[in-house]
Each structure stands twice: as C-alpha cells, then as structure tokens.
Image: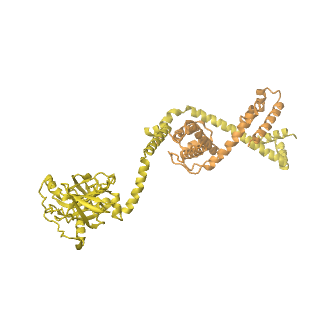
Chain colours: A orange, B yellow
C-alpha cells in the first residue's frame, strides 16, 4: 500500500543548519522533501490537498520556530518528527470537524508525544489571530505605519516621507496614537 | 512626563538607542517606578508578538511560494491509495445502495408478513422445540411429531363401514395373528381387518407394546379361514444400510407397493428402535411390513418426518419379535408360531407381491 516516495532527501542536520541561517534553499528542500508524505497521509484519511497544505505548513512552522528558538534537538529523524506533528494536527482537526472515525491509516512510524510543541504552536496562533484582527480593526494609515515601523523596521524618516507628514514629531505622535489603539484593540479581544 | 514621551523612551531603551547617561538615568527611573517597569515589560512583549506575527506572515509567504512550485495534482494521483472498484462504488453510491437495500428488506419482510409466512414459520419453530423436548420421553409424542400414517376420516358418519382410522397390518402366522402399529389401534372400540379381496374380519387387540409402537391383533371372526403358510420370515438381526427394501400397504384404501432403500440404522433423532428408510409412504401405510429383497420382514412402517424428503421410519423387526415374546401366554388362545421358512426368496418382485398381498391387511379402527 505504502508507495515509496522518491526524493533525494537532504540530511537532517543540513536542514536544521539551513533553518538556523534562515536559508531559503534549505527551507525549500525541507518543504519539497516531505510534502508528498503528508499529502499521502491526509488524502488517504478523509482530507484533500488543501487540508494537506494547511497541516503541512503548520507543521513546518512548528519545526521552524522550534529550531530558531534553539529548542530543537535532533533526537529522532526529521521525517518522523514532521509526520508525528502532522498526524497530531490532523487528528485534532478531524475530531474538530466530527469527521474522525476513530481510525487513522498510517504510512510512517510516528512518535506519540508532540503535544507540547503543538500546544505552544496553538497558543502562539491564538495571539497572532488576535493581532491580525486588531490590525484589521485599526485601519489605514495606522496599520501600515505599525507594520512598517515594527515589522519591517523602517525608520521614522521613511515613514514620514511615505505618508507625507511635515515633520517627524507629527509622525511620532501619530505612531504613538496608533500604537495605543492597537494595544487597546489587541487586549480587548477575548 | 507624558505617556507619549515615556513610550518613546522605552522604545529607544529597547532599541539600544540611548547615550550612556540617558541609559543610566532611565534604568534608575525603571528601578524606582514600578509602573514604568511594568509598562516597559508590557511594551516589550507586545512588540514581540507584533514582530513575530510579521515573521510568521513572512514565513507563510515563503512557504506558499514554495508550495506553488509543487505539482500537487500529479503528486496526489501518485500517493493516493486507490481502493478497489467495489470500494469506490460503495463510496460513491453508498447512500443509494443503502436506500435500495432498505427497500428490498422492507419489501421482503412485508411480503412475508402479508402472506403469513412469517407467522407460520415462527409458530412452527416454537412447536418444534416443544415437541423435540417431549419426543425423547414418550412414544406418544413421537407419534404426534412424526405424522401418524393413519387415515383420518372423521368427517364421514360413524355408521359407514369405513372405520374412523385406517392403517395396515400383516399376518404373523396362518391362524390369524396380525401385527400393526400401536398408534393405529390406540383408542379403538372395535377393529376390523380387510384382506385384498375385500373381505372384512373382526379382530381383537390382544397385546400392545406402546414403547415399540407395536400392537398384535387376532382375527376372531367365524368367517375367517386359515391363511395358509406365511411366505415371509422375520429377520432377527439388523439390516445394512443401502439394502433394497419395500413395503406393501393400504394408504388411502388401495393396495400400494412402495420400493426404496434403507438409509439409516436409526430413526427420528437417533431413535434406535427404528430404521430410517427412503420410501414413498402416505397416511395409511402405518403398520405395514418392511421387507428386504429376499422377502424377510425387517421392520414395521411407522411414520415420516415432515419437510424432509425421503425420510420415513420403520420399527426394527427385532422389536417386533421382542413384543411377540412378551405376549402373556394366557392372551394367546391359539399358538403363535412364527414362520421361519422363506417362500419369497428367489422370486421376482411382482411374484413376491402377488404372494404377499394375501397376508397384508387393511386395519380399520372404529371408536366413538
């Protein structure tokens, strides 16, 4: 049943190093290597290719964050780790959608406990959802100012020119007001 | 200091954008004013989330870009575990199949219900259980279970000289002793036997052996004359499976020859008293002789099993002989000597039957 998925797999440590260096090539290699495995898991367990994409990307993000925060130890094969995370996430989603029949068809071996990683990821996701909502509610031009300043690390000078503020102080005041509102919107959400 | 200014200070502090003096001053402020410190922590965390959110969006974008390059459709075909066509059929049409199946089941059940089959089957089943339980204990229930081969003509008025029940009997000796089944004559007020030429003689039940389902009659009619030597003899031992056997009797009032073979050494439900035989028998055959090819009487026809083709039963001749031995001597007004010369052996079947028919009687039973 289990088809051998042919791909020249890069070594695990190569990938981990690549992620630490924020290498695009390593990320791409990682992504393309293990996607078929997860696609196989999902579409043979009541899912479609979009579910596979969602689940797989979530798992990659979990791994990525874990590596970047230096918490990742290469104690198992990367393949097994990714498969386990995806399996966990998919089971969770299936039962959430009431589509879980109590049985999952496995294609790889997996580790039983990835709960902690998944939980952490979920908590973070909730924060990000709140942030996204808050930014949406904030509206323009505040949203762009916040993003430019805090996310893209643009200087106040740049922002001044972009939005046509006559002097930096005005821009600063505007930014401060925006930040206050953003905080308010963020913390208001349950 | 306004919030605005404080926030700016915090940002500069966090971004390492302060001069040495400013920094010391701010740290002092932070140390002395808890509100400032908590504001700093809160700001730091909030901006952290905001930055991480930005990073996440960035990462997501990169992943999406990579995903775009994968030919998901082709890959999907490759990794899909293709179920067999029957499973595919089921997945695609299971609702239709289920509906069709339910309708079919409903139709069958309602047909059974309305034709009464359902009820009949149920009651038969219950009856069968009860009977099987009783059967092991008593011959009488066995008689009821295996259809008694008595022709029930209750509908006819009593006065008509037909008898209320009819069976078959056969001569044991030339002087008028006749064997039949106990269940044929049970409850009889009077018994007549009628020979092949239509002459009736009054007979008396002189001995019964209910457990073997055997009854011995004696013709006590003045019109009766000696039959002449009985052409068959009685087999003491058992007979083998597969032997050709036949019977001769009066089912429905006519003399009928029934050929067949011995199919089992035990009768209904392993009853060791009886043989199972495959012979066409009907109501009225009860009490008739069962003979083998050579003309030995090997049993007495007794009953058949309903709903099973070719399963009739005959009491083994050994039990007939036992019953004869058990007759108390004061019941016998004449001597009952069994013939041990076989005049049928070597004759062809039609000739055997010609001889035989003078010794096989219709037993007519009258009761109130």
Q: Is residue B79 visible?
A: no
Q: Where residue B105 appears, x then y in whole percent?
A: 46, 43
Taking B94 as reference, is B171 left or right?
left
Q: Is residue B295 above or below residue A132?
A: below
**Quadrant in the picture for the N terminus of chain B:** top right
Q: Residue B257 in the image: x percent, y percent? A: 21, 52
Q: Position of residue B171 (x, y in %)?
A: 19, 62
On the rendered image, what quadrant is the C terminus of chain B found in? bottom left
Q: In the rendering, at what x and y percent does residue A47 appear?
A: 55, 39
Out of B285 and B225, give the one closest to the viewer.
B225
When asked about the image quadrant of residue B59, the answer is top right
Seen in the picture, residue B34 relative to B7 is either above or below; the reply is below
Does A188 sit left or right of B135 as displayed?
right
**A62 left or right, relative to B302:** right
Q: Is residue B59 above or below residue B204?
A: above
Does residue B263 show up? yes
Figure disc tally:
0
| Nearer to the camera, B241 or B33 | B241
Would you say A188 lies left or right of B280 here? right
* Outermost residue to the right: B1
In front of the other: B307 or A109? B307
Q: Determine the residue positioned at 63% across, 34% down.
A: B61
């Amino acid at each position: 049943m289990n088809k051998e998925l042919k791909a020249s797999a890069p070594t695990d440590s190569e990938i981990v190093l690549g992620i630490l260096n924020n290498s695009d090539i390593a990320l791409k290699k990682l992504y393309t290597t293990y996607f078929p495995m997860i696609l196989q898991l999902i579409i043979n367990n009541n899912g479609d290719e979009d579910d596979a994409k969602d689940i797989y990307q979530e798992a990659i993000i979990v791994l990525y964050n874990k590596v970047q925060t230096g918490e990742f130890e290469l104690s198992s094969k990367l393949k097994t780790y990714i498969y386990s995370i995806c399996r966990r996430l998919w089971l969770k989603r299936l039962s959430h959608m009431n589509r879980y029949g109590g049985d999952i068809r496995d294609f790889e071996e997996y580790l039983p406990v990835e709960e902690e990683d998944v939980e952490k990821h979920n908590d973070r996701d909730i924060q990000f959802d709140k942030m996204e909502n808050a930014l949406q509610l904030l509206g323009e031009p505040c949203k762009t100012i916040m993003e430019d300043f805090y996310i893209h690390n643009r200087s106040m000078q740049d922002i001044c020119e972009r939005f046509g503020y006559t002097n930096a102080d005005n821009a600063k005041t505007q930014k401060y007001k925006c930040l206050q509102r953003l905080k308010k919107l963020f913390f208001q959400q349950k | 200091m306004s919030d605005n200014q404080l926030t700016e200070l915090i940002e500069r502090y966090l971004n390492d954008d302060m001069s040495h003096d400013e920094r010391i001053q701010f740290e002092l402020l932070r140390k002395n004013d808890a509100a400032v410190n908590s504001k700093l922590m809160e700001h730091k965390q909030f901006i952290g989330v905001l930055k991480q959110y930005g990073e996440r969006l960035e990462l997501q974008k990169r992943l999406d870009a990579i995903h775009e390059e994968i030919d998901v459709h082709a890959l999907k075909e490759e990794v899909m575990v293709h179920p067999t066509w029957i499973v595919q059929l089921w997945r695609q049409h299971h609702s239709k199949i289920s509906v069709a199946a339910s309708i079919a089941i409903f139709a069958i059940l309602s047909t059974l219900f309305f034709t009464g089959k359902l009820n009949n089957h149920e009651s038969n089943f219950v009856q069968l259980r009860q009977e099987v339980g009783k059967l092991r204990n008593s011959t009488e229930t066995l008689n009821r279970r295996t259809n008694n081969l008595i022709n029930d003509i209750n509908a006819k008025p009593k006065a008509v000289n037909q008898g209320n029940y009819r069976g078959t009997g056969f001569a044991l000796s030339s002087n008028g002793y006749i064997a039949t089944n106990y269940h044929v004559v049970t409850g009889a007020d009077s018994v007549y036997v009628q020979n092949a030429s239509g002459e009736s003689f009054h007979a008396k039940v002189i001995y019964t052996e209910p457990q073997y389902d055997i009854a011995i009659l004696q013709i006590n009619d003045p019109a009766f004359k000696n039959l002449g030597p009985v052409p068959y003899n009685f087999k003491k031992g058992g007979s083998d499976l597969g032997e050709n056997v036949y019977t001769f009797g009066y089912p429905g009032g006519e003399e009928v020859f029934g050929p067949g073979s011995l199919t089992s050494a035990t009768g209904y439900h392993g009853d060791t008293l009886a043989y199972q035989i495959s012979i066409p028998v009907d109501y009225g055959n009860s009490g008739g002789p069962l003979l083998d090819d050579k003309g030995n009487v090997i049993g007495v026809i007794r009953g058949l099993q309903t709903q099973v083709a070719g399963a009739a039963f005959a009491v083994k001749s050994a039990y007939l002989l036992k019953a004869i031995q058990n007759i108390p001597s004061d019941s016998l007004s004449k001597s009952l000597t069994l013939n041990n010369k076989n005049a049928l052996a070597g004759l062809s079947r039609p000739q055997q039957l010609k001889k035989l028919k003078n010794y096989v009687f219709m037993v007519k039973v009258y009761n109130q």
